[in-house]
């Protein structure tokens, strides 16, 4: 399983970004997916997760109402739409997948495959 995250960049507070995560080497709809982030000097934290079919989503409080996770199983791609960005959203964002057919989770320890991360910087 290979996961390739993209879409990060520098944005002003209040702006938006859309992250993408392209999966290869997998039957994508066999995998729940999640987004995590890690800010400098902090531990990796959960951002959002989505079920294999996309019908169930879960968000950390920090992104609830501002972030939307979605997936296109036909394109083997996971997305994270981030609106109303705040400086505290600055972090490296990672997409991740647990092992096949496992349910989605909010815990990083339940995820087995990780993308390389994409940097999001929100300026004030």
Image (cartoon, grey):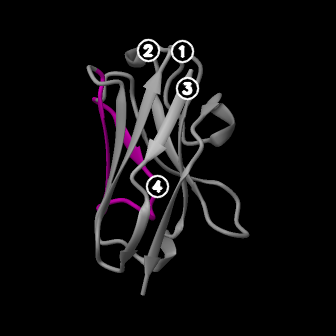
The spot of residue 95 in percent (x, y) is 51, 41
**How far is disc 2 from disc 4 in space, using C-alphas?**
23 Å
**Image disc number at residue 60:** 4
Q: Residue at x 47, y 43 (%)?
A: 5
The spot of residue 56 in percent (x, y) is 33, 33
Q: Residue furthest bottom?
A: 124
> How many numbered discs sit on the rendered protein?
4
Instruction: Please tell me whether residue 87 is drawn above or below residue 54 in the rendered image.
Output: below
Instruction: Please tell me whether residue 55 is drawn above or below residue 47 in the rendered image.
Output: above
Q: Residue at x 70, y 59 (%)?
A: 43
Mark 2 crowdedness (10 Å alpha carbons): few <14, some 14-19, many ≥20? some
Residue placed under numbered mark 2 in the picture: 30
- Which comes before the other along the chain, label 1 or label 4? 4
Q: Residue at x 43, y 64 (%)?
A: 9
**How far is disc 3 from disc 1 in space, using C-alphas?**
13 Å
- Which comes before the other along the chain, label 3 or label 2? 3
Residue placed under numbered mark 1 in the picture: 100
Highlighted range, magenta: 55-73
């Amino acid at each position: 399983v290979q996961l390739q995250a993209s879409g990060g960049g520098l944005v002003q507070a209040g702006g938006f970004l859309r992250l993408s995560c392209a999966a290869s080497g997998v039957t994508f709809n066999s995998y729940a997916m999640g987004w995590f982030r890690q800010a400098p000097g902090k531990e990796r934290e959960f951002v959002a997760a989505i079920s294999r079919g996309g019908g169930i989503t879960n968000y950390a409080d920090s992104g609830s109402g501002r972030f939307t996770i979605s997936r296109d199983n036909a394109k083997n791609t996971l997305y994270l739409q981030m609106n109303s960005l705040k400086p505290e959203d600055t972090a490296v964002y990672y997409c991740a997948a647990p092992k096949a057919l496992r349910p989605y989770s909010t815990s990083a320890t339940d995820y087995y495959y990780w993308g390389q991360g994409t940097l999001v910087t929100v300026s004030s």
